[in-house]
Image (cartoon, rainbow, N blue to C red):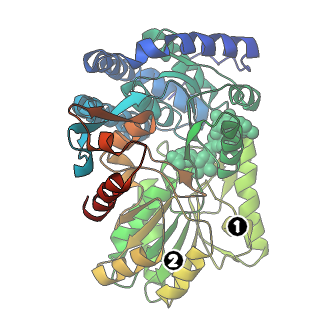
Amino acid sequence: MASTILPPTQFETDVSELSRVFNLQVENQYHIGNTTARQRLDKLNKLHNLILKYRPQIKEALYADYRKHPSEVDLTEIYPITSELKHTKAHLRSWMRGESVKTPFAMMGSSSRIKYESKGVVLIISPWNFPVNLTFGPLVSAIAAGNTVIIKPSEMTPHTSSLMKEMIAEVFNESEAVLVEGGVETSTELLKLPFNHIFFTGAPSIGKIVMKAAAEHLCSVTLELGGKSPTIVDESANISMAARRIAWGKYVNNGQVCIAPDYLYVHESKLEQFITEFKKQVKNFYNNDAANEVSYARIVNQRHYSRIKGYIDDALSKGAKIEVGGTFNKSKDFIAPTLMTNVAKDSTLMTEEIFGPVLPVYGYASVDAVINEINAREKPLALYIYSKKQKNINHVMNNTRAGGTCINHNAAHFFNSNLPFGGSNNSGIGKAHGYEGFKAFSNARAVFQQHLPNALDLLTPPYNDFKQRLIDLTIKWF
Ligand code: NAD
């Protein structure tokens, strides 16, 4: 597919421009925050139509950025947003209604409720690996919650960023939502502004920079981070199905997926069978020629190509063996879908998040030893279990911690807006998608309303024995 779109202009956005739009949004925040459900639904409908209208251009931009196949764009960039939009539109009225909660008997004559009000002016910083999905996804929640929004996408997918800027300007006034292009410099300047919430998706190391900057203004954060997500295939699993799903989860988007299986344990009795099945699946997916198969995306740029190639070389120098793939073309940002065994645990392939099309696999005898290894690392964003035995599944679930888990699949939990999506500690803080996304961009305002005389009115100073007895009774009974 040849790109017909113009090359993007890459630049950092001027600080004065950032302050100008920020101030416009500060001015406008109550107006937007007080919009009705009908008004917000109208905006979400516009956003929905916008995504569908620009579907061909989105595909062109992503092909120009890293040769992503148009069908993969539909599946992993368009569908998650349209699905999130449908879910949000279906539930927005009830979310905006808030919640009535009980009031203790000692406070009778009153009522209590939670009002989800907009946080105000929010910042969304997005990564390059699903640039559309991970920009528009949080934007849906931010708009649903009634915020004004500044978006800073990644500088590494410039065609897509420049297109998204045009798209957002088509439906939003800059005093409500605006996309500013740029890289670290623009991001750094934005982080100095006193936003009311920052929603960041990216690497854990940058998440720490974001959180430190947010602390200056005591600004709340949602950090959608990454790390190494392990997968366990036990002796009872359907090996051919596991191999197919793992190969898909690993090589979709060329392995540049925060929730891709990063490293794999297969029960030793099934390792050989797994490798054979995996080889078969990779051949089927890419017609036995990934280098020339359009379904296989590319590594985003030379920097990331060299990083991943460096990990493979390091592992090979420490005795690793290539079971599948292992071919390269630097000028085309191409690394074949690769599976490796005998990877030393101190090689960079195992000390860093891989974020590319390479999968180390280990045979295991004791699942507890596997659990110990997983738990010795940072908590993963995702942990996957392939097994037919509920007892084994429960054992892994109860003895590990992770942002999310799929059983007998991988990455699929991202696509269900009813599930909270996010990590835990090093893999993330806070949750996204659906109601959780709406709440991330809302302040849960506690509203207590007194209707009739309150028992507490009897307990004001000066205190005396009678009042003390009433206090004692309250503590004892209510
Ligand atoms: P990144 O952290 O390098 O960049 C993300 C964004 O932060 C970009 O917009 C970038 O311009 C900005 N940025 C980079 N350095 C910065 C700095 N020093 N100060 C301020 N802003 C800065 O991440 P990436 O390379 O775009 O994406 C890959 C990482 O993101 C991986 O770790 C992956 O696991 C993670 N990720 C997580 C999720 C999730 O939902 N949890 C989704 C996708 C990617």
Question: Taking 467 as reference, is 40 above or below it?
Answer: above
Quadrant location, ligand no. 1 = top right
Q: Which amino acid does label 1 sit on?
A: Thr
Residue behind label 2 places its C-beta within 8 angstroms of ligand 1: no
Q: Name the residue under label 1.
A: 351
Q: Distance between the residues labelled 1 and 2?
A: 16 Å
- Residue labelled with disc 2: 265
> What is the quadrant of residue 72 in the picture?
top left
Q: Kindly identify the amino acid type of the residue bearing the numbered disc 2.
A: Tyr
Dot 1: what SS? helix
Based on the displayed image, in which of its 4 quarters is residue 37 positioned? top left
Tell me the residue at 66%/10% (across/down): 20
Q: Which of 451 and 147 is in front in this view?
A: 451
Q: Is residue 265 above or below residue 470?
A: below
Label 2: element kind: strand
Q: Give the left or right position of residue 33, taking residue 429 as reference.
A: left
Closer to the camera in the image, 121 or 393: 121
